[in-house]
Image (spheres, rainbow, N blue to C red):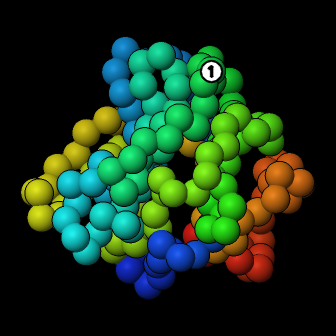
Amino acid sequence: FLEFFTGYFAIIPEMDYTLEFWFKASTTAQTVCLFSNQKGDGTEGEGLVNKALSIYATPDGKIWVASKGNTFEATSNNYFDDSWHHFALVVNRRGNVISLIDGKVQNEIQNTVVGGIANDKMYLGVRKWDNLGGTGEDYYFSGKMDEFRLWNMAKSTNQILLDMNSKLHGDEFGLMVY
């Protein structure tokens, strides 16, 4: 898994954002985590509950988002077919939360279920936590990931389609992590 330090920025619960990455894996017999900065299941404690997020896949291949103690079914289909797929989560505070695979909308829900992303570390390929409930890690992902991007804006579907197959320079407007 990959651990990176992010204490120098935060996506507070009032901010729009887009999180995107490529992944490739076969269906697993267990739940695996693609991204986390805490559990997102609501056990983080008062100060972190609105700032915790995890994106994970269940053995049936569905991708879920956990935040503020809520879960959002990001995909209804299995994309763990040993092919590369692009995942994007768009959070628009005055609108909806939208999940996309390969530039196509998969699911959309009114934005009451997803909080921000703020912690001193973020993780790819594992769910890790360190909060009032204790510390730990689980849901190890054994596939491949590439081109992780976190934006401080809700990107449109067209913007995602235009950028998802392009290598970025790293100084694009709104890009926070690359």
| Viewport quadrant of the C terminus | bottom right
Q: Nearer the viewer, residue 100 or 70?
A: 70
**Residue at (60, 24) in percent of width and height:** 76
Residue count near mark 1 (Cα–Cα under 10 Å), binned few <14, some 14–19, many ≥20: few
User: Is 151 situated above or below 21?
Assistant: below
Q: Position of residue 112 (x, y in %)?
A: 51, 57
Give me the residue at 47% from left, 16% from top.
Answer: 60
Q: Amino acid at mark 1?
A: Asn
Seen in the picture, residue 57 relative to 38 is either above or below; the reply is: above
Residue 68 vertical placement versus 80 (above, below): below
Decide if residue 19 is in sight here: no
Q: Is residue 36 left or right of residue 171?
A: left
The residue depicted at 68 percent of the width and 24 percent of the height is 83
Image height check: is 57 above or below 13? Answer: above
Residue 120: x and y, percent? 33, 74
- Observer able to see residue 154: yes
| Count of numbered marks | 1
Residue 132 placement (x, y as % from top left): 12, 64
Tell me if 171 is positioned left or right of 157 in this view: left
Residue drawn at x 48%, y 53% as measured from the top left: 113
Q: Is residue 14 left or right of residue 6?
A: right
Residue 81 point in image, percent of width and height: 62, 17
Which element is circle 1 on?
loop
Name, please, the residue furthest toward the bottom.
8
Which of the 4 quarters of the picture holds residue 172?
bottom right
Can you identify the residue that label 1 sits on?
A: 77
